[in-house]
Image (cartoon, grey):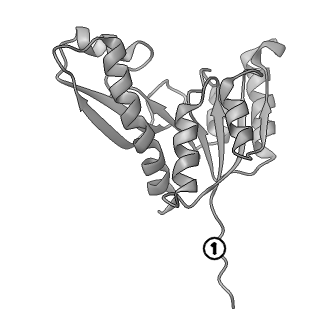
Amino acid sequence: MVHQSVKPKLVILISGRGSNMLSIIKAIDDGELNASIVAVISNRPHAPGISLAQQAGITTSFVDHEQFTSREKFDQALAKEIDLYQPDLVVLAGFMRILTTEFVEHFANRLINIHPSLLPKFKGLNTHQRAIEAGEKEHGASVHFVTPELDDGPIVLQARVNILETDDATTLAARVLEKEHKLYPDAIKLLINQ
């Protein structure tokens, strides 16, 4: 009997430039991550990350949230689009939509997100400014499973950076993003090797 190794399939969801998506593509291209990106899907038809994924030879599509009358209808259409690819993992990489409970439960234990803070601290937006204002000594990023409650699922992996006295939200965000670009592929590798 011949053992066939099938690469785990990823669908990546983006809303913008897709810098974390690019870090995952690079990790695969460099042989550091044994996975296959079967599709990149955006909720914004003109997201810059879509053309970058196309340049990398990856199938792309979009489900424009503005074409739907409710969050539920959008999420149903998005889930249907994702299901076409039968992914092992659905990777939120700068996907700027709050997802319905039904969507999250449909992809339970297969849906991951990266958040720019050391969860459970600083859920939601403006995490870098809030960490500085709170007098934190360190900050970072977390990859976590998505659950119905925002930024609340089990943590897969975290990366930390020290907050410098000279930091503002912009300089801190840049250092955290640099960490994210290594953290996300590492977290995916951890999950698919289990």
Circle count: 1
Within the image, what quadrant is residue 77 found in? top right
- Above or below, 102 relative to 133: below
Residue 100 at x, y percent in the picture: 65, 25
Q: Residue at x 69, y 45 (%)?
A: 56
Q: Secondary structure at mark 1?
A: loop
Q: Residue at x 44, y 14 (%)?
A: 125
30 or 69: which is nearer to us? 30
> The N terminus is located in which quarter?
bottom right
Q: Is residue 109 visible?
A: no
The spot of residue 175 in percent (x, y) is 33, 27
Q: Amino acid at mark 1?
A: Ser
Residue at the spot x=21%, y=22% of the render? Answer: 163
Seen from the viewer's position, the closer of residues 178 and 34 is 178
Residue 13 percent coordinates (x, y): 65, 34
Estimate how packed mark 1 is, as few (under 14), some (14 to 19) or many (20 or more) residues with alpha carbons within 10 Å: few
Question: In the image, residue 103 lies at what x, y percent?
Answer: 67, 32
Q: Residue furthest top?
A: 133
Q: Nearer the viewer, residue 176 or 96?
A: 176
| Placement of 92 over or under 68, stated as above or below | below
Q: Going by the image, does 17 lie left or right of 149?
A: right
Image position of 6 with respect to 171: above or below: below
Which residue, as the protein is rendered here, is positioned at the far bottom?
Answer: 1
Identify which residue is drawn at 73% across, 21% down.
Answer: 44
Question: On the image, numbered disc 1 is attached to which residue?
Answer: 5
Is residue 188 something one can see in this rendering?
yes
